[in-house]
Image: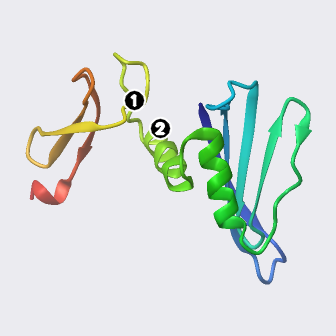
Amino acid sequence: MEITHTSGVEGPKHDPYHWDEYVVTGYNRKFCNPEIHFTVHRGLANWFSIRKDGWKIPDSNMFCWEKYMEEMLFNITGMTFDQVVEKHEEEENGLFCPECNEVPEDTLDYAGYPGETIYCCSKCGAPCGSDQNMSAVI
């Protein structure tokens, strides 16, 4: 499953607004259908769309769109929108296990040098990222 994120600014120059768009591309976990593209757009206009093999449901821009979007997203991908955002951020921040060849579902945190945290895959134990807190060193 692949997650892409784009963002930008649109609207009039005197009153621009920010938007985020996440596209989850993968296979329907229930029906093993061909590739599905689930797009969630958040900005001044909030909507989502689903595309699969040439057909597309109309963009959903309704009053209770968020609840409907969450249900559809979970039924198709098995993830909530918050989990989609979290997984994308993990992939962007480099938490990727070289041994398992995937983003680890959970990590074990170990202290390295002062201020350093090393993240290891909970499945195989391979290091998959680190973080440095300079304020802990001083």
Q: Residue furthest bottom?
A: 14
Instruction: Reply above or below: 22 against 129.
Output: below
Residue type, label 2: Glu
Residue in the foreground of this view, choosing between 81 and 12: 81
Q: Residue at x 81, y 77 (%)?
A: 13
Q: Say which of 31 and 109 sits in front.
A: 31
Name the mark on residue 96: 1
The numbered mark, 2 or 1, whose residue comes first in the sequence reads 2
Question: Where the C terminus falls, by quadrant?
Answer: bottom left
Q: Are marks 2 and 1 in contact (CB under 8 Å)?
A: yes
Type of the residue with mark 1: Phe
Crowding at mark 2 (Cα within 10 Å: few <14, some 14-19, many 20+)? some
Coloration of the structure image: rainbow
In the figure, 17 relative to 23: above or below? Answer: below
Q: Quadrant of residue 50?
A: top right
Instruction: State which quarter of the image contains the N terminus.
Output: top right
Horizontal placement of 3 versus 54: left or right?
left
Locate residue 73, reporting x and y percent. 64, 48
Q: Which residue corresponds to the image point at 27% horizontal and 37% vertical from the top-left?
A: 107
Q: At numbered mark 1, what does the secondary structure look like: helix, strand or loop?
A: loop
Q: Residue at point 74% right, 27% down? A: 35
Image height check: is 31 above or below 68? above
* Side (left or right) of 100 relative to 110: right
Apparent side of residue 128 relative to residue 38 in the rendered image (left or right): left
Residue at left offset 25%, top offset 30%: 122
Q: How far apart are marks 2 and 1 (CA)?
A: 7 Å
Quarter-of-image position of residue 65: bottom right
Query: Which class describes the residues within 10 Å of circle 1: few (<14), some (14-19), or many (20+)?
Result: many
For residue 91, which numbered disc appears in the image? Answer: 2
Query: In the picture, residue 130 is in which quadrant?
Result: top left
Q: Left or right of 45: which side holds 138? A: left
Nearest the viewer among 50 and 72 is: 72
